[in-house]
Amino acid sequence: MEQLAQLPGDLVFYTQITMEAAEDPAFLAAMRRAHILGALVGVESVTAEELKDVYKDFNLSGDALVARLRTFTQHGVHVLGSFIFGLPSDRSDTSDASVALANEALDARAIRTPDPVSRDP
């Protein structure tokens, strides 16, 4: 990522990453310096039951998922969430619950985003 950081500031990157990357603030800061401004994050589902259906029960759900997604945004990495719908455990409110969680995770009042021009969080 150090080499990417040397590229011109008007060149930006997006990547695909697991949500575990948010456990490492230094890594997120390095992403920002490397002009990686967004990431496709495999959220998959917002409930533990649905995560089990896709063998991703190691992923977070509920409030822990909200906190993890906010960590990306707090470090200036925009999140493009990847969700799976149509699982056996889906309920009639699955889509609504996913939208509500995404709105809560990205609530502008709850997070501070870095200056879009700056490479520092």
Image (cartoon, rainbow, N blue to C red):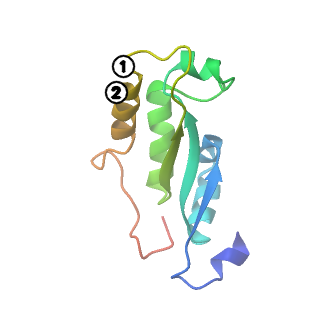
Crowdedness near tag 2: few (<14), some (14–19) or many (≥20) residues, C-alpha within 10 Å: few
Position in image of residue 16 (x %, y %): 63, 53
In the image, is residue 19 above or below residue 56?
A: below
Figure quadrant of residue 27: bottom right
Point out the residue furthest to the left here. 109
| CB-based contact (under 8 Å), mark 2 and mark 1 | yes
Q: Secondary structure at mark 2?
A: helix
In the image, is residue 84 above or below residue 75?
A: above
Give the residue drawn at x 44%, y 35%: 66
Position in image of residue 91 (x %, y %): 43, 15
Q: Nearer the viewer, residue 76 or 46?
A: 46
Q: Amino acid at mark 1?
A: Asp
Position in image of residue 94 (x %, y %): 41, 22
Q: Secondary structure at mark 1?
A: loop
Give the residue drawn at x 30%, y 50%: 108
Q: Amino acid at mark 2?
A: Asp
Figure quadrant of residue 54: top right
Mark 2 vs mark 1, CA separation in Å: 5 Å
For residue 28, side relative to residue 121 (left or right):
right
User: Which residue bears the numbered disc 2?
Assistant: 96
The disc label shown at residue 93, or none: 1
Point out the residue furthest to the front here. 86
Give the residue drawn at x 55%, y 32%: 84
